[in-house]
Image: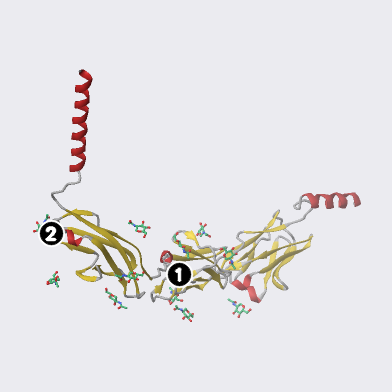
Amino acid sequence: MRMETLTCAVLLLLYQESCGAVEVRPSANPAVVGSSVTLSLSPSSSLNSGSWAVGEYLILTWSRLGDQDQVAVYPDHLGRASIDAGRALTLTSLSVNDSGLYTMKSTDPKLSASLSLTVLEPIVNVTTNASVSPLVEHRSTAVALCSVSSGSSVSFAWFNSSSEVVVSDRVRLTEGNATLSIVTISRYDQGPFTCLASNPVSNATSDPVDFTIYYGPDNMNVTLGSHTTGSNVTAVCTAQSNPAARMHWTFGGELLNSSGSELELYHVTKEQSGLYSCVAFNNETKLSHNVTGFLQIKDANSGSDRPKAVWILRLLCLAELMFTFWDI
Ligand SMILES: *[C@@H]1O[C@H](CO)[C@@H](O)[C@H](O)[C@H]1NC(C)=O
Ligand SMILES: *[C@@H]1O[C@H](CO)[C@@H](O)[C@H](O)[C@H]1NC(C)=O
Ligand SMILES: *[C@@H]1O[C@H](CO)[C@@H](O)[C@H](O)[C@H]1NC(C)=O
Ligand SMILES: *[C@@H]1O[C@H](CO)[C@@H](O)[C@H](O)[C@H]1NC(C)=O
Ligand SMILES: *[C@@H]1O[C@H](CO)[C@@H](O)[C@H](O)[C@H]1NC(C)=O
Ligand SMILES: *[C@@H]1O[C@H](CO)[C@@H](O)[C@H](O)[C@H]1NC(C)=O
Ligand SMILES: *[C@@H]1O[C@H](CO)[C@@H](O)[C@H](O)[C@H]1NC(C)=O
Ligand SMILES: *[C@@H]1O[C@H](CO)[C@@H](O)[C@H](O)[C@H]1NC(C)=O
Ligand SMILES: *[C@@H]1O[C@H](CO)[C@@H](O)[C@H](O)[C@H]1NC(C)=O
Ligand SMILES: *[C@@H]1O[C@H](CO)[C@@H](O)[C@H](O)[C@H]1NC(C)=O
Ligand SMILES: CC(=O)N[C@H]1CO[C@H](CO)[C@@H](O)[C@@H]1O
């Protein structure tokens, strides 16, 4: 007898299921609100009498009389709890309050086992509330708050397009990552941003949040180039700006009669050579920026290839002269 107990204890350490030890195996853990869960005993055994309890509260008791099972369900679980021949407990219509430590106690034979069950509410309706008013680059802070209509143990994560938002000196995640703040926003922060809410039983993503960010004008360029007298010149000015910048042109300090990103000059003369400025203004950021370029206008009849050709001709003449000398 003593020897047997010792062997049993050793085996128990090695392998719990020997020596009449049982463990509780849940069909789901965590389980979802509204669903059912079965807490099976492993190995399954037709124990003669015992009880199931959650915390200190009895759920049901059973005992076998002859070949008849007598099961008594306590009022708190009436209609929701049952056991099968293997003494597995099934609970239906689970609520969050069903979370707890479930213990099976058998009195014949003497055995007990327990399991901590968690019941979670699935996530429903992930929404964000973000400011819809436009933001100004380098000046505004963007804030977006994520919330769910229902769901337990929810954790939040934010995505910028498809990559997860990472915290930096500019980007903050607060309130358990539910709130995203971008301080001194930049033009590259327009998103779309989405919030992923998840718990061990479900997950859901919010509608995308797009920020409207006003910026610029900056990174301006102007293309002028080289032209000949009498030709028509089209110069183009570009700027990064949101909303699009309004543009005008100046030449020698004078405002030109041309507004918009394109400057058109017809039948140009040499006097129109010089520095041209394109001035851009963004009416939302109230910022102005300009870029200057040189427009070169040359005489149409004095082609630049002429002098070169003359020199080559002269060299050829010289060579011919030299060859004539050698021949002599
Ligand atoms: C869960 O328990 C709380 C208090 O502990 C109670 O207010 C609530 O009504 C219970 N919910 C359900 C579904 O039993
Ligand atoms: C989702 O949540 C928003 C904000 O909390 C609410 O206005 C809306 O009615 C909810 N929709 C559903 C289907 O629950
Ligand atoms: C977001 O919701 C909170 C309260 O739920 C409200 O105080 C806040 O003004 C809302 N923010 C925006 C940008 O709508
Ligand atoms: C917030 O998100 C970070 C990853 O960006 C994660 O490491 C952290 O555990 C999250 N915090 C909470 C409270 O979920
Ligand atoms: C969002 O993604 C863009 C493009 O990768 C990046 O430039 C920007 O810094 C990101 N913003 C935030 C707040 O993660
Ligand atoms: C979201 O839930 C689906 C199943 O509904 C699962 O396949 C996926 O891995 C989950 N994603 C995350 C990020 O938890
Ligand atoms: C310049 O523009 C004028 C007016 O649009 C046009 O009549 C003329 O043919 C153009 N000249 C050249 C060289 O394209
Ligand atoms: C400015 O251009 C418009 C049409 O493009 C023309 O009607 C107007 O006479 C021009 N004004 C001057 C001062 O050249
Ligand atoms: C800026 O100009 C646009 C049109 O170019 C106009 O729709 C907008 O109302 C203007 N904004 C301000 C602040 O004047
Ligand atoms: C261009 O910008 C400079 C300063 O950045 C300013 O001094 C100058 O007056 C501007 N020129 C025009 C034509 O607006
Ligand atoms: C399209 C283009 O040429 N962009 C250039 C405009 O000028 C800035 C500098 O002011 C350059 O960085 C851009 O590449």
In the image, 162 versus 38, the foreground residue is 162
- Report whether 1 appears left or right of 321: right
Q: Which mark is residue 185?
A: 1
Q: Using the rendered view, name the quadrant where residue 295 is placed.
A: bottom left
Label 2: state its secondary structure.
loop
Q: Earlier in the sequence, mark 1 or mark 2?
A: 1
> Badge 2 is on which residue?
267
Which residue is at a point 25% across and 65% down the rendered structure image? 261
Q: Position of residue 30 (x, y in %)?
A: 61, 63
Mark 1 Cα shell of 10 Å, populated few (<14), some (14-19), many (≥20): many
Distance from mark 1 CB to nearest ligand 5 atom below 8 Å: no
Q: Position of residue 133 (x, y in %)?
A: 39, 76
- Report whether 223 appears left or right of 192: left
Q: Position of residue 144 (x, y in %)?
A: 47, 72
- Report whether 89 appears left or right of 314: right
Please, what is the three-letter code of the amino acid marked with disc 1? Ile
Label 1: state its secondary structure.
loop
Which residue is at a point 14% across and 51% down the rendered structure image? 300
Distance from mark 2 CB to nearest ligand 7 atom below 8 Å: yes
C-alpha gap between disc 1 and disc 2: 47 Å
Q: Using the rendered view, name the quadrant where residue 229 is placed.
A: bottom left
Q: Ligand 11 is in which quadrant of the figure?
A: bottom left
Indicate the quadrant containing the C terminus: top left, top right, bottom left or bottom right. top left
Q: Position of residue 238 (x, y in %)?
A: 29, 62
Q: Nearer the viewer, mark 1 or mark 2?
A: 2
